[in-house]
Image (cartoon, rainbow, N blue to C red):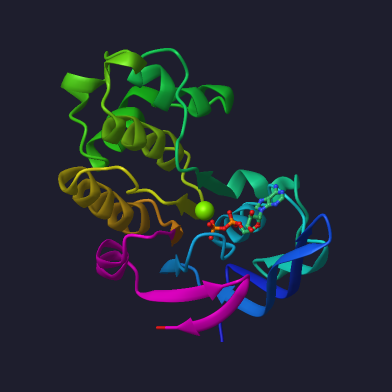
């Protein structure tokens, strides 16, 4: 059996004595597209923050490629979370997508940015020069997605990526998710309320209720 990309064991997360997540074991394979579903407050966003190593669980272990990993470790660079309402730098679309490449000293930035924009359905000739305030909500979401994809994360986590988007934008996000996996080699974990959309894109869906894993379909 291959080593999972990331696995959780005996995870408990508490906020001021209240247990909001209680998961005995859960693992995600490399190259998979997995959904998280469940009612409001069931723990989806909390689970994504743990998988992103943005916070540490009060109990339990999270293993990344076979090694126990901590929040704020070097693993962080290989994992990225696209939050529900991402914010952009107050600059052009190009500058937003190029930012992470610049600070990492990467080459071929214009080519990489153009490809990432194409993948999220934003024609570079139209959008690269646009300012952050010249974008619809769906376009902001996709610029934020391009800015993460371009860094080739091993694990891309998305929190309600289609909330408040129209059907056309949701379809573009669906296509971008497939490209993230097939072209950038990312594995994806996506929390969503939008069941038809999630069922269309995810290979498997874990259902949470009151912080517990209740079923996997
Ligand atoms: N930082 C926090 N401090 C206190 N309680 C929190 C915090 N984050 C989440 N919670 C609580 O944890 C529970 C799970 O929330 P969340 O993970 O956001 O669920 P979901 O994303 O499924 O709606 C909720 O009851 C929420 O109020
Ligand atoms: Mg949430």
Q: Is residue 173 toward the left or the right of residue 31 in the image?
A: left
Residue at left offset 62%, top offset 43%: 77
Judge whether residue 31 can be spotted in this image: no
Indicate yes or no whether the magenta region holds residue 2: no
The mark total stands at 0
Tell whether 70 sits left or right of 40: right
State the quadrant of the N terminus: bottom right
Residue visible at 50% across and 48% down in the picture:
153
Q: Is residue 214 magenta?
A: yes
Residue drawn at point x = 48 percent, y = 52 percent: 156
Quadrant holding the C terminus: bottom left
Q: Residue at x 74, y 71 (%)?
A: 11
Eyeballing the image, is 42 above or below 212?
Answer: above
Q: Nearer the viewer, residue 124 or 17?
A: 17
Image location (x, y in percent) of residue 67: 74, 66
Residue 115 coordinates in the image, percent (x, y): 28, 35
Q: Nearer the viewer, residue 119 or 141?
A: 141
Asked whether, in this view, residue 73 is left or right of residue 214, the answer is right
The answer to whether residue 211 of the structure is visible from this angle is yes
In this image, 49 relative to 162: left or right? right
- Magenta residue span: 191-216
Residue 146 location in percent, x, y? Answer: 37, 36
Which residue is the extreme one toward the bottom?
Answer: 1
């Amino acid at each position: 059996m291959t080593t999972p990309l990331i696995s959780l064991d005996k995870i408990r997360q508490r906020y001021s004595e209240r247990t909001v997540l209680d998961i005995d074991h859960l693992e995600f394979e490399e190259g998979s597209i997995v959904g998280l579903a469940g009612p409001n407050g069931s723990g989806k966003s909390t689970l994504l923050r743990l998988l992103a190593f943005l916070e540490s669980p009060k109990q339990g272990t999270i293993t990344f490629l076979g090694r126990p990993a901590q929040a704020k470790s070097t693993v962080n660079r290989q994992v990225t979370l696209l939050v529900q309402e991402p914010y952009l730098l107050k600059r052009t679309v190009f500058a937003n997508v190029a930012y992470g490449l610049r600070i990492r000293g990467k080459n071929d930035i214009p080519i990489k940015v153009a490809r990432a924009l194409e993948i999220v359905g934003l024609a570079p000739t139209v959008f690269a020069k646009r300012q952050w305030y010249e974008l619809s909500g769906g376009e902001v979401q996709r610029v934020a997605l391009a800015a993460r994809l371009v860094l080739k994360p091993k694990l891309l986590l998305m929190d309600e990526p289609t909330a408040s988007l129209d059907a056309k934008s949701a379809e573009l996000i669906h296509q971008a998710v497939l490209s993230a996996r097939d072209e950038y080699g990312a594995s994806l974990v996506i929390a969503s309320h939008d069941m038809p959309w999630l069922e269309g894109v995810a290979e498997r869906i874990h259902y949470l209720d009151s912080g517990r894993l209740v079923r996997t379909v």
